[in-house]
Image (cartoon, rainbow, N blue to C red):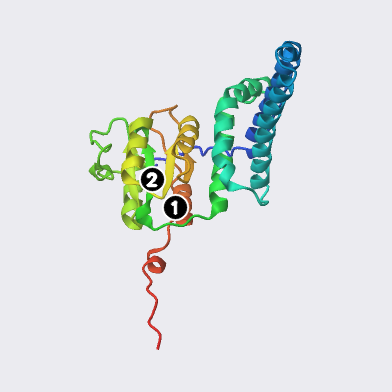
């Protein structure tokens, strides 16, 4: 009998409402904490200056209003309704501040940190796809982690992926072939610092990153306002070791971004 092909389990689709729900709950608790701080401090502030409680209360109210408006803006985006895209940076800042609280709250409901990070990536990808960004292939940078390479491979690909011999032992060869076919830039990074350096030096207009939930979440926020879309890697052997990626999903995402060569090179015919 012939050798049976190894089936690599595909990751399930994260639920977008999971992340939004936990961040909303964390924001509500934060608002309650600010109210208690204000309420306890009112007598002392009044003795210093009668207007201080009102000033502090106004500042706290503004902070909470902006935070909840950012969350409502996310809900509108996920629901397919009109939303304000320029608030995305402020929303990401708020998410960074409250994410540890959201993780602790998630544990109370049986939600893991990985699930929350995956849900954030799903929300971020949806925002990216709603913008319908299209760029020439040479302005797209595809970044992958070093763990996508077979651990026993002797060929160094972190500086030049074309050192890959395309033996089929991992997905690097397929990504190199796809890069040659479509014309985008492809780089294998050993860590977040090197990945950020590559983004800075290559100056792409769009980044497609392949990584685990944690690295994708931090990376997407680090490069903002540069548009970035994430594809989760597959970890049949555990994290950071002989990982894989769904190549069909990678191709689908790239085809949504890259302007086909025939249309980008098409020149307007002269009149007359």
Residue displayed at 33% across by 57% down? 181
* Residue 91 appears left or right of 56: left
The image quadrant that residue 89 belongs to is top right
Q: Nearer the viewer, residue 27 or 264?
A: 27
Q: Between marks 1 and 2, how big is the CA–CA gap?
A: 9 Å
* Residue 251 appears left or right of 161: right
Mark number displayed over residue 254:
1
The percent coordinates of residue 44 (x first, y second) are 72, 10
Which quarter of the figure is the N terminus placed in?
A: top left
The percent coordinates of residue 220 (x first, y second) are 48, 38
Can you identify the residue that label 2 sits on?
142
* Dot 1: element: helix
Residue displayed at 75% across by 18% down? 50
Q: Are marks 1 and 2 in contact (CB under 8 Å)?
A: yes
Q: Is residue 171 visible?
A: yes
The residue lying furthest to the front in this view is: 49
* Dot 2: element: strand
């Amino acid at each position: 009998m012939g050798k049976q092909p190894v089936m690599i389990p595909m990751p399930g689709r994260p639920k977008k409402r999971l992340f939004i729900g936990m961040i909303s709950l964390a924001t509500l608790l934060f608002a309650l904490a600010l109210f208690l701080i204000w309420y306890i401090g009112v007598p002392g502030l009044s003795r210093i200056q009668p207007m201080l409680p009102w000033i502090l209360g106004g500042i706290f109210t503004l902070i909470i209003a902006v935070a909840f408006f950012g969350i409502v803006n996310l809900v509108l985006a996920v629901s397919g309704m009109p939303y304000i895209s320029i608030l995305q940076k402020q929303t990401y800042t708020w998410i960074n501040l409250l994410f540890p609280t959201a993780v602790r709250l998630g544990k109370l409901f049986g939600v893991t940190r990985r699930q929350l990070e995956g849900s954030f990536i799903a929300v971020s990808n949806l925002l990216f796809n709603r913008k319908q960004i299209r760029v020439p292939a040479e302005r797209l940078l595809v970044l992958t982690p070093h763990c996508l390479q077979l651990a026993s491979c002797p060929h160094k690909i972190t500086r030049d992926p074309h050192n890959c011999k395309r033996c089929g032992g991992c997905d690097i060869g397929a990504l190199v072939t796809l890069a040659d076919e479509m014309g985008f830039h492809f780089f294998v990074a050993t860590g977040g610092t090197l990945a950020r350096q590559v983004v800075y030096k290559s100056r792409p207009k769009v980044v497609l990153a392949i990584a685990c939930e944690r690295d994708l979440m931090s990376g997407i926020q680090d490069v903002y306002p540069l548009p970035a879309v994430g594809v989760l890697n597959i970890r049949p052997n555990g994290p950071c070791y002989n990982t894989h990626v769904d190549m069909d999903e990678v191709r689908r995402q790239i085809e949504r971004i890259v302007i086909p060569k025939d249309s980008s090179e098409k020149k307007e015919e002269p009149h007359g």
